[in-house]
């Protein structure tokens, strides 16, 4: 299986080809999708896996897979003539929405947690979004529920769309994320056994499963990987129950701290139907996986984007995957999103200040 080189709007267009491969002018876009799939050069061999691949969703225009969702959602808003919207975000949805709204002339207000990483907040601000930081939002299930109820009520009263990256709230927009599955199928020539997906609210996992439902042939097993500090899906899966209960989130992994049932119950159903497993990982495992991605694979990713790899390492330990299996880890967000985690990783490799005359001895030592 040799991953093909991805192109933004499909294969390169020859000069005499029709313009059908050019972007549709009615589609809101910044060139999202068709992200690269690359083979592992370090972690695969270390784990005894011959066919480990990374799907680089961090290569999307604003640095995360959320661009697939927002492109579809903003297309819908533009078609309706919407001039303003409100959203909730742990970071990447807001960054993406702010960018696309700036491009298409939509005023957006975004409710975020005070703990949202600076990189994501700056992305929203530079595009002109109005940020509203609410104490306890996301980390507290009670506060989060109150905020969501308030926003849903105001959205109805003010006729202002509420943008949330969950099928429960924005099913048409989230359908745009399903495109990951046919891309993977094509890139892997239909030969794929396992996909590891980081789970916060659950929209990404749900979209990947639904996407594979529409792809001919046998679907791979799609696995949940979730921080132990916010185990909405993992806990319910392990207990064998069908509903997800709110939790108090203690994880520091930005983007995966969703303590209420956004799409989590839907994830449970899809997970069991698909035959996948649910892996809970400690924050320390995620940060370790991120450092491995940075220093051994050359992939510049935020912690949440390394969570799939952390789950895969657990799966290998439990012998759930085989050495010849074809495996993909979704890399969901770019490293610039979480500068604090990048700074911690960089601290392991401090620079050395030299006099000019010391350079040769240092390089030849």
Image (cartoon, rainbow, N blue to C red):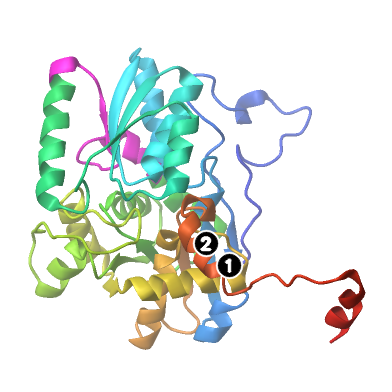
Residue 342 image label: 2
Mark 1 vs mark 2, CA separation in Å: 6 Å
Quadrant of the snapshot with the N terminus:
bottom right
Residue 53 or residue 136, whichever sits in front: 136
Q: Give the side of residue 70 with respect to residue 110, left or right.
A: right
Coordinates of residue 33 in the picture (x, y in percent):
52, 43
Task: Tell me, yes or no, if residue 193 can be seen here.
Answer: no
Coordinates of residue 30 in the picture (x, y in percent):
54, 32
Count of picture labels: 2
Task: Tell me, yes or no, if residue 93 can be seen here.
Answer: yes
> Magenta segment, which residues?
157-177
The residue pinned by badge 1 equals 346
* Residue at left offset 56%, top offset 57%: 187
Q: Secondary structure at mark 2?
A: helix
Quarter of the image holding residue 41?
Answer: bottom right
Quarter of the image holding residue 160?
Answer: top left
Above or below residue 88? Residue 184 is below
Coordinates of residue 125 in the picture (x, y in percent):
44, 32
* Residue at left offset 25%, top offset 24%: 161
* Residue at left offset 7%, top offset 67%: 241
Residue 235 or residue 212, whichever sits in front: 235
């Amino acid at each position: 299986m040799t991953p093909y080189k991805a192109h933004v709007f499909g294969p390169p267009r020859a000069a005499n080809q029709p313009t059908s491969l050019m972007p549709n002018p009615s589609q809101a876009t910044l060139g999202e999708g068709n992200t690269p799939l690359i083979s592992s050069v370090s972690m695969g061999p270390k784990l005894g896996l011959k066919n480990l691949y990374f799907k680089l969703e961090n290569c999307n225009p604003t640095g995360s897979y959320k661009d697939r969702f927002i492109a579809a959602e903003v297309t819908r808003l533009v078609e309706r003539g919407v001039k303003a919207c409100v959203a909730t975000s742990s970071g990447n949805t807001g960054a993406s929405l702010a960018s696309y709204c700036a491009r298409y002339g939509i005023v957006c207000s975004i409710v975020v947690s005070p703990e949202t990483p600076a990189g994501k907040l700056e992305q929203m601000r530079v595009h002109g979004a109005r940020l509203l930081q609410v104490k306890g939002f996301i980390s507290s299930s009670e506060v989060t529920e109150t905020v969501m109820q308030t926003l849903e009520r105001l959205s109805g009263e003010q006729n202002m769309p509420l943008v949330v990256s969950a099928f429960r709230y924005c099913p048409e927009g989230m359908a745009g994320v399903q495109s990951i599955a046919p891309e993977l199928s094509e890139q892997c020539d239909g030969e794929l056994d396992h996909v590891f997906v980081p789970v916060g609210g659950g929209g990404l996992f749900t979209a990947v499963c639904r996407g594979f439902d529409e792809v001919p042939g046998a679907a791979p097993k799609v696995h949940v990987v979730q921080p132990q500090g916010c185990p909405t899906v993992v806990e319910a899966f392990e207990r064998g129950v069908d509903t997800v209960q709110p939790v108090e989130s203690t994880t520091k992994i930005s983007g995966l701290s969703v303590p209420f049932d956004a799409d989590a119950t839907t994830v449970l159903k899809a997970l069991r139907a698909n035959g996948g497993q649910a892996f809970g990982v400690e924050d320390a495992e995620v940060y370790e996986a991120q450092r491995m991605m940075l220093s051994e694979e050359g992939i510049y990713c935020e912690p949440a984007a390394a969570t799939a790899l952390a789950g895969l390492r657990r799966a290998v330990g439990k012998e759930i995957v085989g050495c010849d299996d074809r495996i993909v880890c979704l890399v969901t967000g770019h490293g610039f999103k979480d500068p604090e985690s990048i700074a911690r990783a960089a601290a392991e490799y401090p620079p050395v200040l030299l006099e000019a005359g010391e350079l040769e001895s240092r390089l030849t030592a």
